[in-house]
Image (cartoon, rainbow, N blue to C red):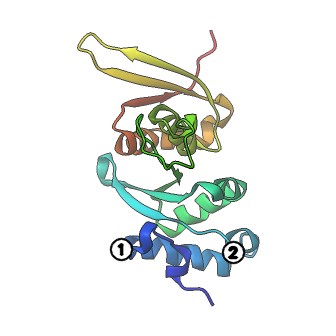
Amino acid sequence: MSTPKSKIVKAGGAEPDEFETSVAQEFLNLEIAAIELKPDLQHLHLTAAKELELDGGRKAIIIFVPFRQLKDYHKIHPRLVRELEKKFSGRHVVIVAQRTILPKSVNRSAAQKAPRPRSRTLTAVHDSILEDIVYPTEIVGKRIRYKVDGTKILKVFLDPKDLVNVETKLDTFSKVYKSLTNKDVVFEFPVDV
């Protein structure tokens, strides 16, 4: 029999906090109760969970998963998020892969004299986080708007076929992205003229 602590694997063997343990417990409950999710959830675990305050007293839950298991999470993403949102009384749930950003001048061992991989750059990781946040919706366009005072706002256009499913979560997506990357983003749906 699994325990909640077996569902959460923290870096360096650190102990999960109370909130992370409650999220891991819900994962375990879903594995036991939801027969259609059990084979997929059995081998999956999470690395961290974080609760985020939104406007109007609402909250969102950010679940960090190992990058290598992200494709397996994507297979069950809609059902898993729907079940977790039910369990956590209407809070929006976002699943994001745990990624590493390497600095430009990374000290590598003598055996690894290769240059820094593109997937570990700041820009690539931020773009990947953006795609994780809006999954399963696809991003169909991006624009950066530079204001007169020097601030930048990223406008992200999402696939209009998912308008009904995602429309209520747009504010959550922008707050989650702001908390993870410290960048402002506005989510919109393209308007055909």
The mark nearer the N terminus, 1 or 2, is: 1
- Residue 49 point in image, percent of width and height: 44, 63
Q: Is residue 155 above or below residue 177?
A: above
The foreground one among 71 and 68 is 68
The numbered disc on residue 42 is: 2
Q: Residue at x 51, y 74 (%)?
A: 24
Per the model, the C-alpha gap separating discs 1 and 2 is: 22 Å
Q: Nearer the viewer, residue 53 or 121?
A: 121
Tell me if mark 1 has few (under 14), some (14-19) or many (20+) residues whose alpha carbon lies within 10 angstroms of its own. Answer: few
Q: Is residue 186 left or right of residue 179?
A: right
Residue furthest out toward the front: 110
Residue 163 placement: quadrant: top right
| Residue drawn at x 60%, y 59% as measured from the top left | 82
Pinpoint residue 191: horizontal percent, then vertical percent: 59, 17
Question: Looking at the image, is 161 positioned above or below residue 54?
Answer: above
Labelled disc at residue 88: none
Residue drawn at 50 percent across, 39 percent down: 125
Tag 1 secondary structure:
loop
Camera-side residue: 136 or 88? 136
Q: Identify the residue under disc 1.
A: 17
What kind of element bears circle 2? loop
